[in-house]
Image: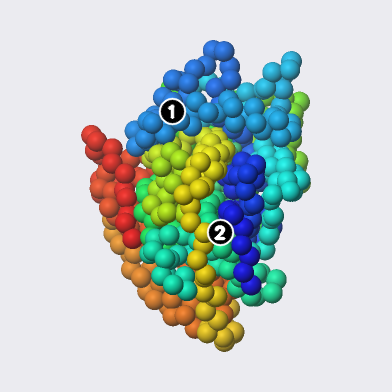
Amino acid sequence: MTKAHDVLVIGSGAAGLTAALALAEERQVLVLAKGSLTGGSTAWAQGGIAAVLDAGDTFENHIRDTMVAGAGLNDLETVEFVIERAPQSIDRLCELGVPFNRESGDLHLTREGGHSHRRIVHVDDATGWAVQEALLKAAEAHPNITMLPGRSCIDLITGRHGERYSGEGRIWGAYALDEATGKVEKHVARATVLAAGGAGRVYLFSTAPRGATGDGIAMAWRAGCRVSNMEMMQFHPTCLYNLEVKNFLITEAVRGEGGHLLHPETGHRYMVDYDPVRMELAPRDIVARANDDQIKRDGLDYVHLDISHQPPEFVKEHFPTIHEKLAGLGIDMTTDPIPVVPAQHYTCGGVKVSLDARTDLPGLWAAGECTESGLHGANRLASNSLLECFVFGEAAAKDILACWDDLDEPPPIKDWDESRVSDSDEQVVIKQNWTEIRRFMWNYVGIVRTTKRLERAATRIRMLQEEVEDYYGSFVVTTDLIELRNLLQAAELIVRSALERKESRGLHYILDYPETDPAARDTVLVP
Ligand code: FAD
Ligand code: SIN
């Protein structure tokens, strides 16, 4: 089945819907999402969105904090571009009806690690859900937007897929699996915006939702885009430790509002030994490494995050979602410490994009967590990522609309090759490989790395890639298989980038090269 729209947007999170809404002012837009429309990371965001809104704060402060957290690997022009547009992004979200917390009429600003000032606007401790709802409501109401959930994009359509060759790199949309029917559709468009989120699920422990399997990064790489800084995988210091509930984040705002990290046996407030000035509000890489160090050094299962010294009403008012969730598990955060561990949280690297969200390939723009725009450098500053989605989603739309008349009509495109007709009866192979990748990535490519362990991971990836490509070539595609293939591709890019960086910087901490080079350089992989 062929569906032709002016613009195809892959992803219905903050980046995809921001682009779609701006594009829909002039063009017909199709939005595809794997699983449900709320299945991306956006809906899970807790802390909030960073923006300079307080009279005592400045853009220069926010820019400096972003560069310090990013260990100098950030691109200054991008950092300025995003941070200067933050207040207008917040205005736009207010217009869309996001009910940000207010105090005497003004937006309430909370604080998170690495920020020198209070500058995080939020909706209690569930900001992402409120943002996702408001964007979805606006997109659903827009006559020029069609949204199709339950579509797993398999690959981008390139010049090779045209019935006549139309340029190797030109992108004309995507092939997508209809998850309900099992049929592969082609969605052809003059312009495509990739907004498919991160690759967090490549790790065994991650705060990211199930679908964060690096599909966008892998599809762009296969089509011919460069990717950069994939070794910069961010680990959040405080994911709930619970044997039943996995992947539940305890927002950094708990530390921002006074929470302490304590050794669970001695009660020692150990951040004093790692970063005595900034303590629990040091950038995330430092706090995550400290937690990891405490756990590994003393053979602990977890460390404690304690905010019970604040008045109970204050805690309940600021963190209603977390309070309720923990209460259901028998933890009263107003009186008890919370057991926490570090977990993968954010993919700083991705598809290389310019300030107008262009990728290397004509016809393809990209925005959000699947990209590397230069904003985050070697470590993302808390609450800068939703902001990046809004700014780059808008930038992509603006650029597409500006160059619309120069974009050719799509040529006739071949249907999906249906020659892989046999259904696999080996689901267990997929499950086994998923678990294996995520486990060795956690053990070999985690918070603290060594060359030897990275090489070990690279060998495992090569073997699994052969097996999965063989499998992919023989059997009918399923979402699980698409994800496994992409997960492996993302793992390969992470390990390859980590082996290329022969220094420790930000999130990439490698025992063989503990020093930081004087000059900061991106790790850019070329397909
Ligand atoms: P996502 O919101 O992840 O959306 C990806 C979209 O792509 C989804 O619709 C998905 O279905 C679709 N997709 C993926 N693969 C395919 C495919 N093959 N075919 C079709 N569609 C596909 N950032 C902040 O700034 N502040 C916070 O407070 C904050 N808290 C966070 C809390 C948690 C628990 C997590 C996990 C992240 C948090 N982040 C936060 C990070 C932030 O939420 C994400 O970086 C951001 O939401 C990413 O938005 P996105 O639009 O790029 O992708
Ligand atoms: C959090 O609420 O701690 C997450 C904030 C972020 O990832 O930006």
Q: Amino acid at mark 2?
A: Ala
Dot 1 and dot 2 residues touching (CB under 8 Å):
no
- Compare residues 445 and 78 and report the one nearer the observer: 78
- Compare residues 97 and 431 and report the one nearer the observer: 97
Where disc 2 sits, the SS reads strand
- Compare residues 231 and 163 and report the one nearer the observer: 163
- For label 1, the crowd category at 10 Å Cα-Cα, with few meaning under 14, some 14 to 19 and many 20 or more, is some
* Quadrant of the frame with the N terminus: bottom right
* Quadrant of the frame with the C terminus: bottom left
Residue at the image position 40 percent from the left and 39 percent from the top: 374
> In this rendering, would 145 be left or right of 58?
right
422 to 362, vertically: above or below: below
119 to 36, vertically: above or below: above
In percent of width and height, residue 386 lies at 57, 39
| Residue ID for mark 1 | 80
Closest to the camera, between mark 1 and mark 2, is 2
| Residue ID for mark 2 | 189
